[in-house]
Image: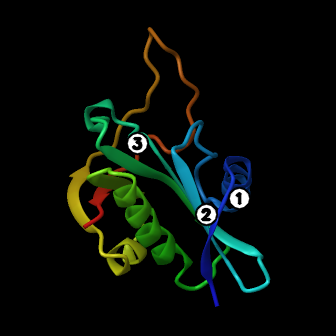
Amino acid sequence: MLHLVPVRSRDARAMVAMWHRHHQPPVGQIFAVGVADDDGVLHGVAIVGRPVARMYDTGQTLEVTRVAVDGSKNACSMLYAAAWRAASALGYTRLITYTQVGESGSSLRAAGWRVIAQRSAHPGWDRPSRPRTALGTEHMPRTLWEAS
């Protein structure tokens, strides 16, 4: 049986590095939450931070920047639901996240989230004025979700 647990930033980042399919741990965060079994073994984490897109960084919006689990059933939906409850309790009025093409979003739907936009593939973040290293997630259409 899984239950929610607090998670330190360094532990959440380590779990993302170990379990996430296509992203490295994010640089920053506002908070993290985990799911563990009755023996205290961590089975998943969610990291919530400021929105990556600056137009969403209003001071009232947060973004689930990473969710990483070891495959435990219902862990993702528990984490998405807990992230919204925690963000709401902290006074935030909006929580968003993205999925990549090919990801069903079933955990988000189970947690009560809804699709608000489809985003076309982005060419990447590299610009002449601020070079960036390609991470392998460029040129990937995404779906924008919002907690409700």
Residue type (three-letter) at the residue carrying disc 2: Val
Residue corresponding to mark 2: 45
Q: Sequence-wise, which precedes: disc 2 or disc 1? A: 1
Q: Position of residue 134 (x, y in %)?
A: 56, 32
Residue 69, can we see it? no
| Crowding at mark 3 (Cα within 10 Å: few <14, some 14-19, many 20+) | few
Q: Quadrant of the N terminus?
A: bottom right
Q: What separation in Å lies between label 3 and label 2 (alpha carbons)?
A: 26 Å
Image quarter of residue 145 = bottom left
Q: Secondary structure at mark 2?
A: strand
Q: Nearer the viewer, mark 1 or mark 3?
A: 1
Q: Secondary structure at mark 3?
A: loop
Label 1 crowd bin: few (<14), some (14–19), many (20+), radius 10 Å: many
**Is residue 78 toward the left or the right of residue 18 in the image?**
left
Q: Amino acid at mark 1?
A: Met
Q: Position of residue 138 (x, y in %)?
A: 45, 40
Are circles 2 and 1 on residues that touch, CB within 8 Å? yes
Q: Quadrant of residue 29?
A: top right
Residue at point 38%, 33% (across, down): 123
Disc 1 and disc 3 in contact, CB within 8 angstroms: no
**Residue wearing tag 3:** 139
- Camera-nearest residue between 80 and 134: 80
**Residue drawn at 63 percent across, 59 percent down:** 20
Q: Is residue 108 above or below residue 141?
A: below
Of residue 25 and residue 32, the one placed in the foreground of this image is 32
Q: Which residue is mark 1?
A: 15
**Mark 1: secondary structure:** helix
Give the distance between the C-alpha atoms of the residues marked 2 and 1, in whole angstroms: 7 Å
